[in-house]
């Protein structure tokens, strides 16, 4: 799952993500005091184009996007999204990364690059994560970022101000002085990342084949392209949808979609509205060819514009017939009766289903609603893994971690950062006040509340998009021991609490696979770092302090001290990753 190399005491590991790469650097010896400036990182794509990874920070604290050749990366890990600055679109394939430690002279001036210290990591696969018949995709979830604001604008609207909610996304959405006009499709493709591609790909595949039918579970449902594809399938008599009808989805776009769907539907297409005990909370697409299931997509991503373009979410795609059939069988049972009491009596609700094979990771699937007894058993089993003294790392991204969340797991995750004998990194949208930001000289873990990090950064950063009431974090995943043979990732649509497990139509997966766990770990690390930075760095209140100190790179070399302090989580992380 990683490619590594070393040169003159500098080592680099390139971990494969899903269309991302996490670079982890290490220096065998602590640099001489005041001498270390950071890392210059270049990447070479499959076309041979060589570019320096960019840095929004520089030594002057001015508004200038700089290459890491003149503004080194002052961190020992970096998550690279190809195509962010130097190329249009995501150029996938084999990449080479070149990492060079950089140093200051006695006058704090950056010394030239010493090529003899450069470490090259070659043949790094940068592509959608797919192994055998299993794939993982994510939304980008960076609507609140400098990258989005620079490209599309901090006040950019995600939807047209008027007109039909099912619209042509190739309409002009705005203009950028550097890049020119852009459409909603441009913006959506950037934000939706490969989760959007995977969802659209399944529905388009079905639409273009006369032998494929679709069964879909939907909760939030208002993405214009997904809605249009489903309406086209409805007119061909080849789609069934179980659509939530809890109060929050009545009287709005879901009702409007249902009316349009029924007006177009030919024999074979139908919508069934239900909510089990509380919500029909699954987000799934099942493809059948001549009545036989052969693909199933699941995860946390709602088929809505917030789910794809605002929230941090994941999707899982299984092209394995046995797993697809399992999800199809569950769908058929729910199609007959979408009530919690009835589903709890089925065999599906009272035990896990195990899947193993040479072309899929070891996967356990639980579908709910469950009885209270089984729900408690399921949640407690995850808690026991998370809190086990043998577990070395826990990385998580869980939307709801408030004190009203029932069961043993959420309280355990809220407390986990206090245990400094384990590496923990986590992010949520509701921590019930339990927050643990990075503290120099402390080994305790991070627990970041993304909603509380919804603030403005100091110069040279510009104003960012305001999330308002929208979720930043919608994931529901927990990763344990990501870089060890016993690695696990718990994920899916479940909010990992007893309430949902007993009342919602949901699915919760446990995937035991180091590669898959690493892909999710990278996602958790990049989100936690993103919002930890926003929590630690806040622009001054001009009404109280007219002097705003800009954020800039450290030219004293002191920044590196924390990475070699054995009582600092940055040192723990450096050793864990590199």
Image: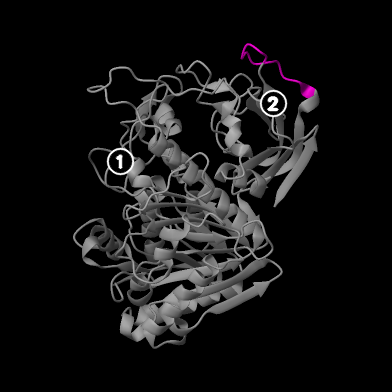
Q: Foreground residue, 432 or 571? A: 571
Where disc 2 sits, the SS reads loop
Residue mark closest to the camera, 1 vs 2: 2
Question: Which quarter of the rendered picture does the C terminus lie within?
Answer: top right
- Residue at image position (72%, 29%) is 48
Query: Which disc number belongs to residue 32?
Result: 2
- Quarter-of-image position of residue 243: bottom left
Is residue 312 shown left or right of residue 100? left
**Marks 1 and 2, how far apart at CA:** 53 Å
Indicate yes or no whether the magenta region holds residue 106: yes
- Quarter-of-image position of residue 401: bottom left
Dominant secondary structure, magenta = loop
Q: Residue 549 placed where, x, y %?
A: 39, 20
Where disc 1 sits, the SS reads loop
Q: Earlier in the sequence, mark 1 or mark 2?
A: 2
Is residue 149 shown left or right of residue 568? left
Compared to residue 497, the image places residue 254 above or below, namely above
- What residue would you read off at disc 1? 159
Q: Residue 257 placed where, x, y %?
A: 28, 59
Q: Which residues are magenta?
A: 105-115
């Amino acid at each position: 799952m990683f490619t590594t190399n070393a040169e003159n005491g500098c080592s680099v590991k390139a971990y494969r993500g899903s269309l991302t790469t996490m670079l982890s650097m290490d220096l065998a010896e602590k640099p001489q005091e005041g001498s270390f400036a950071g890392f210059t990182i270049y990447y070479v794509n499959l076309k041979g184009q060589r570019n320096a990874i960019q840095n929004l920070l520089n030594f002057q604290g001015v508004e200038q996007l700089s290459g890491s050749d003149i503004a080194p990366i002052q961190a020992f890990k970096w998550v690279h999204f190809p195509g962010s600055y130097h190329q249009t679109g995501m150029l996938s394939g084999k990449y080479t990364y070149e990492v060079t430690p950089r140093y200051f002279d006695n006058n704090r001036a950056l010394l030239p690059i010493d090529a003899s210290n450069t470490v090259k990591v070659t043949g790094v696969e940068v592509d959608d994560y797919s192994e055998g018949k299993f794939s993982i995709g994510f939304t980008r979830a960076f609507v609140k970022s400098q990258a989005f604001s620079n490209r599309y604008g901090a006040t950019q609207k995600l939807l047209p101000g008027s007109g039909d909610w099912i619209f042509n996304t190739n309409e002009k959405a705005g203009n950028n002085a550097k890049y020119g006009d852009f459409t909603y499709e441009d913006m959506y493709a950037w934000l939706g990342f490969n989760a959007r591609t995977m969802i659209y790909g399944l529905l388009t595949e079905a639409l273009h084949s006369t032998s494929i039918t679709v069964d879909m579970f939907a909760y939030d449902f208002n993405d214009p392209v997904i809605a249009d594809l489903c309406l086209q399938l409805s007119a061909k008599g080849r789609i069934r949808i179980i659509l939530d009808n809890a109060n929050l989805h009545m009287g709005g776009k879901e009702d409007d979609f249902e009316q349009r769907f029924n007006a177009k539907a030919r024999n074979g297409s139908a919508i069934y509205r239900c909510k089990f005990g509380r919500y029909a909370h699954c987000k799934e697409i099942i493809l059948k060819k001549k009545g036989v299931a052969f693909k199933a997509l699941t995860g946390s991503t709602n088929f809505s514009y917030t789910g794809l373009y605002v929230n941090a979410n994941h999707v899982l795609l299984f092209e394995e017939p046995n797993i697809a059939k399992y999800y199809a069988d569950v769908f058929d049972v729910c199609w007959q009766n979408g009530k919690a009491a009835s589903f709890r009596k089925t065999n599906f609700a009272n035990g896990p289903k195990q899947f193993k094979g040479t072309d899929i990771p070891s996967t356990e699937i639980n579908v709910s609603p469950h009885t209270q007894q089984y729900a408690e058993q399921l949640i407690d089993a995850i808690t026991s893994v998370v809190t086990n003294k043998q577990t070395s790392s826990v990385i998580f991204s869980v939307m709801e971690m408030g004190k009203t969340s029932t069961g043993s797991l959420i309280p355990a995750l809220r407390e986990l950062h206090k245990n400094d004998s384990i590496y923990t990194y986590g992010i949520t949208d509701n921590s019930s006040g339990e927050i643990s930001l990075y503290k120099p000289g402390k080994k305790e873990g991070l627990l970041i509340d993304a909603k509380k990090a919804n603030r403005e950064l100091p110069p040279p950063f510009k104003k960012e998009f305001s999330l308002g009431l929208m979720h930043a974090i919608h994931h529901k995943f927990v990763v344990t021991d990501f870089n060890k043979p016993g690695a696990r990732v718990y994920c899916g649509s479940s909010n990992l609490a007893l309430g949902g497990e007993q009342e919602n139509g949901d699915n919760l997966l446990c995937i035991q696979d180091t590669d898959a766990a690493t892909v999710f770990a990278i996602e958790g690390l990049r989100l936690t770092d993103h919002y930890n930075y926003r929590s630690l760095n806040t622009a001054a209140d001009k009404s109280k302090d007219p002097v705003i100190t800009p954020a800039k790179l450290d030219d004293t070399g002191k920044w590196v001290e924390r990475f070699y302090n054995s009582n600092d989580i940055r040192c723990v992380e450096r050793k864990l990753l590199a």
